[in-house]
């Protein structure tokens, strides 16, 4: 292991030893997770799944525990309030990983519990073979447990994370979330991550979609420019259920959105679409694994990345089709647009198929703005910055198509406009 990463892992383990007496939940589960982290260490580029993404910058930082008292309302809260003010929906707000009831509007149509009050580690995320899940399991203090009863359409719910350093010192927090939809239930979940200063946000989310249920899950990652976000999500979809996910990565110095989706019942569907807009020295990684374990299931992945400056984008997408999963329909496409000769995109689409009656395809393209299209717009009097913005938006249009909720889509479009105005 890299020396700095080893030191960082040891620091996290030392913090666990200091906190273990007051951490909520099953102590045996946490101890097993700590043992896994001791054995595995933090991932390095020698690990195949992390070949393109180095956590060395994480190892060079020294993270501290977030304050136990409630942090004051800061600029991030004010910016967020402006963003979500037009959205009339309940919201759960966490600052540095802890629930802020004073900023939250609790939902009435779902059953909500905080992890701090009712610890529940779930059964999908495995700490024995994933070091970041082990780190989260070892140190999780709070999170949202959301359950939608059978047949209920719960509408829109916001899950908000605000991160901030403490007096200039980086902090680390590890929220543990669980979203469970009973048979025939529906929910649209908008997850927003914002912050200021250096910090590590390491959430683990478990999602269970029962028979005939539908979860629309939109994630806006707009963390502080100095922050790290390492998000791991496990989803299991039953027969005729739908997990419809979309991720927009804009912020953070380094971020990774890792999704493991399992189609466990006939006729299930998983959509893992996304977009990344990066600049300066940002590194953003979308890694997905979709397991087709039942017949007649469909998965769709369209991920588009725009890179400026010296930024790096990563997409790793894997579709696994079991022998029993006949009539599988799997599609995966990754496309990148380079706005700078110093930007880099690493793409690794994969298929592993054991069934013989399937329709699966994947592809990847990397290119730059079309010079002829740019010349055409410039010749019609369109300023260069505006012409480039028009072409970039056209490139991203397909990725945003699945986001159909008007208020949610408007929020994403405002975030993209803000990114472009700063990058232009």
Image (spheres, grey):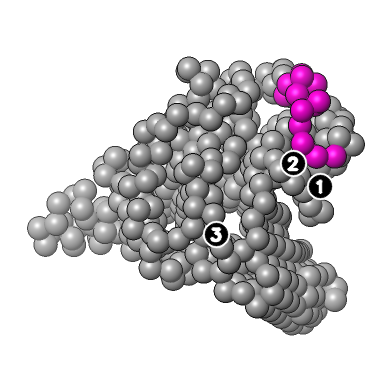
Q: Which residues are magenta?
A: 12-26
Q: Earlier in the sequence, mark 3 or mark 1?
A: 3
* Mark toward the viewer: 3 or 2: 3
Query: Dot 3, how many residues are within 10 Å of its Cα: few (below 14), some (14-19), or many (20+)?
Result: some
Judging from the image, what secondary structure is the residue with disc 3 in? loop
Q: CA distance from mark 3 to mark 2?
A: 28 Å
Q: Earlier in the sequence, mark 1 or mark 2?
A: 1
Judging from the image, what secondary structure is the residue with disc 2 in? helix
Does the CB distance between marks 3 and 1 fall below 8 Å? no
Q: Does residue 403 sit above or below 388 in this rendering?
A: below
Q: Earlier in the sequence, mark 3 or mark 2?
A: 3
Residue named by callout 1: 126
Is 410 in front, or is 115? 115
Q: Is residue 407 left or right of residue 64?
A: left
The C terminus: image quadrant: top left
Q: CA distance from mark 3 to mark 1?
A: 29 Å
Query: Dot 1, how many residues are within 10 Å of its Cα: few (below 14), some (14-19), or many (20+)?
Result: some
Query: Dot 2, how many residues are within 10 Å of its Cα: few (below 14), some (14-19), or many (20+)?
Result: many
What residue lies at 77% left-to-right and 28% top-to-bottom? 22
- State the image coordinates of residue 367 (x, y, percent, origin top left): 42, 54
Does the CB distance between marks 3 and 2 fall below 8 Å? no
Q: Is residue 197 left or right of residue 107?
A: left
Residue named by callout 3: 107
- State the image coordinates of residue 118 (x, y, percent, origin top left): 74, 46
Q: Does residue 122 sit above or below 72 in this rendering?
A: below
Is 89 in front, or is 171? 89
| Residue 126 forms part of the magenta stretch | no
Q: Is residue 65 left or right of residue 323?
A: left
**Disc ID at residue 133:** 2
Could you tell me if residue 363 is visible in this image?
Answer: no
Judging from the image, what secondary structure is the residue with disc 1 in? loop
Q: How many labels, in total?
A: 3
């Amino acid at each position: 292991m890299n020396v700095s990463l080893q030191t960082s892992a040891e620091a996290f383990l030392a913090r666990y030893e200091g906190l273990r007496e007051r951490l909520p939940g099953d102590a045996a589960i946490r101890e097993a997770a700590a043992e896994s982290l001791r054995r595995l260490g933090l991932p390095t580029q020698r690990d195949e799944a992390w070949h393109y993404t180095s956590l060395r910058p994480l190892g060079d930082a020294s993270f501290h525990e977030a304050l136990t008292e409630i942090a004051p309302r800061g600029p991030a809260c004010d910016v967020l309030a402006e963003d979500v003010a037009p959205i009339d929906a309940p919201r759960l707000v966490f600052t540095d990983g802890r629930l802020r009831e004073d900023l939250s509007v609790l939902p009435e149509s779902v059953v909500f519990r905080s992890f701090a009050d009712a610890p529940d580690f779930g059964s999908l995320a495995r700490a024995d073979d994933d070091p970041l899940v082990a780190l989260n399991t070892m140190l999780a203090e709070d999170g949202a447990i959301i359950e939608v009863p059978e047949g209920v359409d719960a509408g829109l719910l916001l899950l908000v994370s605000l991160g901030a350093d403490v007096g200039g010192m980086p902090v680390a927090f590890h929220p543990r979330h669980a979203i469970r939809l009973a048979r025939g239930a529906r929910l649209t979940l908008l997850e927003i991550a914002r912050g200021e200063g250096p910090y590590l946000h390491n959430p683990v989310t478990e999602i269970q979609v029962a028979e005939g249920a539908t979860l629309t899950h939109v994630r806006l990652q707009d963390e502080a420019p100095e922050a790290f976000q390492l998000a791991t999500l496990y989803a299991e979809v039953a027969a005729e259920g739908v997990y419809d996910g979309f991720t927009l990565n804009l912020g953070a110095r380094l971020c990774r959105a890792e999704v493991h989706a399992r189609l466990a019942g006939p006729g299930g569907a998983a959509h893992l679409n996304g977009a990344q807009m990066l600049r300066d020295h940002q590194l953003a990684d979308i890694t997905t694994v979709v397991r087709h374990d039942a017949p007649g299931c469909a998965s769709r992945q369209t991920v588009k990345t725009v890179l400026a400056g010296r930024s790096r984008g990563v997409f790793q997408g894997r579709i696994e089709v079991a022998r029993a999963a006949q009539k599988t329909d799997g599609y995966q496409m990754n496309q990148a647009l380079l706005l700078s000769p110093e930007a880099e995109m690493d793409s690794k689409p994969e298929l592993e198929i054991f069934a013989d009656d399937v329709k699966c395809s994947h592809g990847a393209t990397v290119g730059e703005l079309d010079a002829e299209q740019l010349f055409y717009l410039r010749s019609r009097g369109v300023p260069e910055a505006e012409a480039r913005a028009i072409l970039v938006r056209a490139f991203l249009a397909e990725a945003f198509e699945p986001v159909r909720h008007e208020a949610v889509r408007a929020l994403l479009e405002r975030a993209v406009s803000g990114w472009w105005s700063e990058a232009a």
